[in-house]
Amino acid sequence: MRSVKAIFKKQAKDSFKNRMVLVQFLIFPIMAFVLTELVAKPSEDIPDAMFVTMFAAMFSGMAPLTMTAGAIAEDKEHKSLRFLVTAGVKPQEYLLGVGGFVLLICSLMSVAFGFIGGFAGLDLPQFISVLILGSAASMLLGASIGILSKNQQAATATSVPVFMLLSFTPMIANFNDSVAKLATVFYTQQVNTLVNDSSGSVGKAFLIMLGNIAVFLVLFVLAYQKKGLKG
């Protein structure tokens, strides 16, 4: 647990020093709030929660992925990861330290989205749970990208097309049945579906997201064991 706490604190300090990281997390709920108050609520034709659900789904697919990939790639680039592995830090300890901080921020942002969107009753915890699960999947995928990347620049170059694919596929799926069938296996599709329709098949969607999380977790462990000592 000491290793997890130390990595968690290190990640927190590094993140708060990087203003771009904070902006990346805050911009989505801020935009959702502004557009909800100035556009959605004054209009009778736009659902009050439309912008909240749209930005929340984009947030869970992008922010934790890019932040985690960048953080781990930075550790590799600065040889911090080499030191941690040599010191006996296990993959799960490193992941809990870095990912724990990322998920904490994501959880706070998910709660903010929920209140901005006016969710109440059972809809609120379900909405928050969906976003946290989506963020966990993104974080794990980002962790794998970070481990497999040589440096931050390489991590960014890989993260951008990945999150664009994951974010835009659900949108395209709304207009194309073939894409919709393919997108079903993506956690981002399930997040997009549930935040927009809480009456959907929750159990099936959660199982698909948990399946994505399991796959990304295995991928991270394998990547850590293979690339963890390499700068």
Image (cartoon, rainbow, N blue to C red):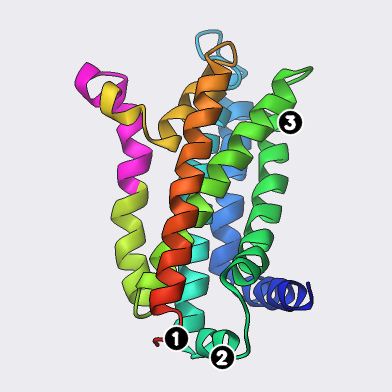
Residue under the point 31% across and 34% down: 169
What residue did someone put label 1 on? Answer: 229
Read off the magenta span. 164-180
User: Upstream in the sequence, badge 2 or badge 3?
Assistant: 2
Q: Is residue 174 visible?
A: yes
Residue 190 higher or lower than 140, as above or below: above
Q: Quadrant of residue 141?
A: bottom left
User: Is residue 50 shown to the viewer in this render?
Assistant: no
Q: CA distance from mark 2 to mark 1?
A: 8 Å
- Pair 2/3: label in front: 2
Q: Which residue is at 50% across, 35% downward?
A: 209
Q: Are marks 2 and 1 in contact (CB under 8 Å)?
A: yes
**Residue carrying label 2:** 86
The residue positioned 63% from the left and 90% from the top of the image is: 87
In-image side of 214 versus 127 (left or right): left
Q: Was residue 177 drawn as part of the magenta stretch in this picture? A: yes
The crowd level at tag 2 (other Cα within 10 Å; few <14, some 14-19, many 20+) is few
Horizontal and vertical percent position of residue 14: 63, 77
Observer-nearest of 177 and 112? 177
Residue flagged by tag 2: what amino acid is it? Thr
Amino acid residing under circle 1: Leu
For mark 3, what is the residue?
115
